[in-house]
Image (tube, grey):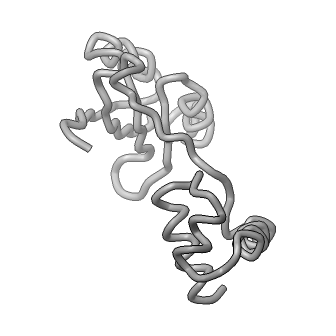
Amino acid sequence: MDILDKKILEILKINARESFANIGKEVGLSAPAIGKRVRLMEEEGIIEGYVLKLNHEKLGIETKAYITLVIHRGSTGSNDAQKQIQAMEEVQSCDRITGDDCLCVLGYFRNNKHLISFLEKIAEYGASKTSIILEA
């Protein structure tokens, strides 16, 4: 990976749909040369995929929150809890973390009532602490 690849990645981070022609103008290469570099970075696993950015408010999401969870020591281990929580539609990410807490969940909710319902649902896995995101 050279300096041109790094410049290409910086442009794609801002807009993953930027045309190869526009990227080429920015870095001084032809569109086919940019396409070749991008495909090579995809094949090498440097670029793993592309993400769709949504306006969550327009989709009815009013509340976003980070929820940390201390898993109950019992029949359900943190691996099982993580898999089950990750599958819930509200969950954007569910990461195992260090420290007293076992999981950190990022969830999107229609409103605070929906968040409360979600917290009641995951209470079977452990004790939670919630931080509502005020501004991102």
Q: Residue at x 29, y 21 (%)?
A: 62
98 or 113, nearer to the observer: 113
Q: Residue at x 54, y 22 (%)?
A: 89
Q: Position of residue 43 (x, y in %)?
A: 80, 67
101 or 56, nearer to the observer: 56
120 or 108, nearer to the observer: 108
Q: In the image, 70: left or right of 37?
A: left
- In this rendering, the answer to whether 33 lies above or below 68 is below
Tell me the quarter of the image containing the N terminus: bottom right
Task: Report which quarter residue 85 is drawn in.
Answer: top right
Q: Position of residue 18 (x, y in %)?
A: 57, 56
- In this rendering, the answer to whether 28 lies above or below 108 is below
Q: In the image, 70: left or right of 42?
A: left
Q: In the image, 102: left or right of 36?
A: left
Task: Report which quarter residue 118 is drawn in.
Answer: top left
- In this rendering, the answer to whether 132 lies above or below 100 is above
Q: In the image, 130: left or right of 93?
A: left
